[in-house]
Amino acid sequence: MHAVVIGAGVIGSSIALQLKRSGHDVSVIDRNSAAGMGSTSASSAVVRFNYSTFDAVALHYGRIFKISSMEAMVTQRIH
């Protein structure tokens, strides 16, 4: 079987690799000039499954402001 994978980011590349390991012919199509140049390139290299609920997103959003204020406080003391 010949498979065509659309997207050469982390997900598309992983799928293509597994298909090839399974013995299939694979073509990967991406709009960018190289693999991983789309949204994968802006990733922090973490796959987060725990931000799929409203509560988890709200908790993380709140932490951003707490961390930012702590960083400002530490920076002021250093200078």
Image (tube, rainbow, N blue to C red):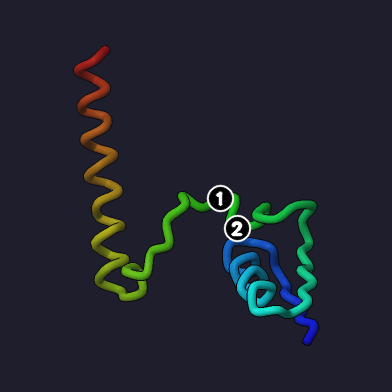
- Residue drawn at (25%, 42%), measured in percent from left and top? 67
How many angstroms separate mark 2 from mark 1 (CA)?
5 Å
Secondary element type, mark 1: helix
Secondary element type, mark 2: helix
Q: Is residue 33 left or right of residue 43?
A: right
- Residue drawn at (46%, 49%), measured in percent from left and top? 44
- Residue drawn at (75%, 52%), measured in percent from left and top? 34
Closer to the camera, 48 or 56? 48
Q: Which residue is mark 2?
A: 39
CA neighbours of label 2 inside 10 A, class few (<14), some (14 to 19), many (20+): few
Q: Position of residue 4 (x, y in %)?
A: 77, 78
Q: Position of residue 24 (x, y in %)?
A: 73, 80
Q: Amino acid at mark 1?
A: Ala
Q: Is residue 21 left or right of residue 51?
A: right
Q: Are marks 2 and 1 in contact (CB under 8 Å)?
A: yes
Of all residues shown, which one is farthest toward the top?
A: 79
Q: Which residue is mark 1?
A: 42
Q: Is residue 47 left or right of residue 67?
A: right
Q: Is residue 73 left or right of residue 12?
A: left
Q: Is residue 79 above or below residue 68?
A: above
Q: Position of residue 74 (x, y in %)?
A: 21, 25
Q: Amino acid at mark 2?
A: Ser
Rendering quarter of residue 26: bottom right
Quadrant for the N terminus, please. Answer: bottom right
Rendering quarter of residue 73: top left
